[in-house]
Image: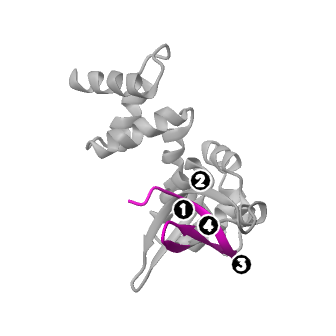
C-alpha cells in the first residue's frame, strides 16, 4: 500500500496536482482546499490511497489520516467510487460527517450533488458502524486499530480490544502491548 507521499508541487489542475517525488512525477487527485492552500513549488506531504481501475491506477491524496480513513471506508461501499467519495470530503467536514453518522442523520449527505435520499441513507447505514471505530480514538489508537487489523483481528475485535485498554496506559507501543495482552487472555 502506498500510505503517504512527500514532494514538491510542479503543477495544479482542476481536481489534482502533479507532485515531484524523487524521480517520479505523480498526479494526485485531492480536495479543493488542498489545491487552494498549496502553491506550485511548495513541498507537501499527503496521506494517499492508490485506487485500481480497469485500465489505470489513480492516486488520491489527503491532508490527514482521518480523511484517508473515511475515503477508504466510502469507496468500500458498493456504488460509491473515488470521485464521489472525494466530492463528499470536499463538501462535508469530517467532524460534521462523524456527527451526522453518530446521530443517524443521512440528510447532510443529500447536500452533495449526485446523492439522493436513498443513497444518503445507504451510505449512512454502511458508515454508521465505522464511526465507532474512531469515535473517541486518538491518532495512536487509530494506528493500533490498523495494526490489529493487519494482524488478523476483525474490526469488531480490534475496537473491543482498544476500548478495553486502561486510559492510564499512554503511548502507541504500550497501548498496543496492552491490547495484545488482552487478546491472548481470550
| Alpha carbons under labels 1 and 3: distance apart | 29 Å
Q: Is 53 one of the magenta-colored residues?
A: no
Nearer to us: label 2 or label 1: 2
Query: Mark 3 — residue?
Result: 14
Residue 162, located in which quarter of the rendered image?
A: top left
Query: Mark 4 — residue?
Result: 86
Q: Residue at x 57, y 48 (%)?
A: 66
Range of magenta residues: 1-26
Identify the disc placed on residue 122: 1
Front residue of this view, candidates 38 and 152: 38
Query: Mark 2 — residue?
Result: 67
Q: Earlier in the sequence, mark 2 or mark 4?
A: 2
Can the viewer see residue 180?
yes
Front residue of this view, candidates 103 and 90: 90
Residue 86, located in which quarter of the rendered image?
A: bottom right
Residue 17, located in which quarter of the rendered image?
A: bottom right
Amino acid at each position: 500500500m502506498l500510505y503517504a507521499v512527500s514532494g514538491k508541487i510542479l503543477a495544479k489542475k482542476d481536481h489534482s496536482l502533479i507532485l515531484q517525488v524523487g524521480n517520479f512525477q505523480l498526479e494526485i487527485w485531492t480536495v479543493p482546499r488542498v489545491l487552494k492552500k498549496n502553491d506550485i513549488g511548495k513541498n507537501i506531504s499527503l496521506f494517499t490511497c492508490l485506487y485500481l481501475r480497469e485500465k489505470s491506477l489513480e492516486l488520491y491524496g489527503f491532508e490527514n489520516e482521518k480523511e484517508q480513513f473515511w475515503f477508504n471506508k466510502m469507496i468500500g461501499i458498493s456504488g460509491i467510487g473515488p470521485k464521489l467519495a472525494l466530492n463528499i470530503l470536499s463538501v462535508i467536514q469530517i467532524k460534521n460527517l462523524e456527527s451526522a453518522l453518530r446521530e443517524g442523520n443521512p440528510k447532510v449527505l443529500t447536500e452533495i450533488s449526485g446523492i439522493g435520499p436513498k443513497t444518503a441513507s445507504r451510505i449512512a447505514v454502511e458508515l454508521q458502524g465505522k464511526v465507532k471505530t474512531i469515535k473517541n480514538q486518538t491518532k495512536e489508537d487509530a494506528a493500533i486499530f490498523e495494526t490489529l487489523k493487519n494482524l488478523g483481528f476483525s474490526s469488531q475485535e480490534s475496537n473491543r480490544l482498544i476500548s478495553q485498554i486502561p486510559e492510564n496506559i499512554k503511548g502507541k507501543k504500550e497501548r498496543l502491548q496492552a491490547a495484545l495482552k488482552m487478546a491472548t487472555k481470550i
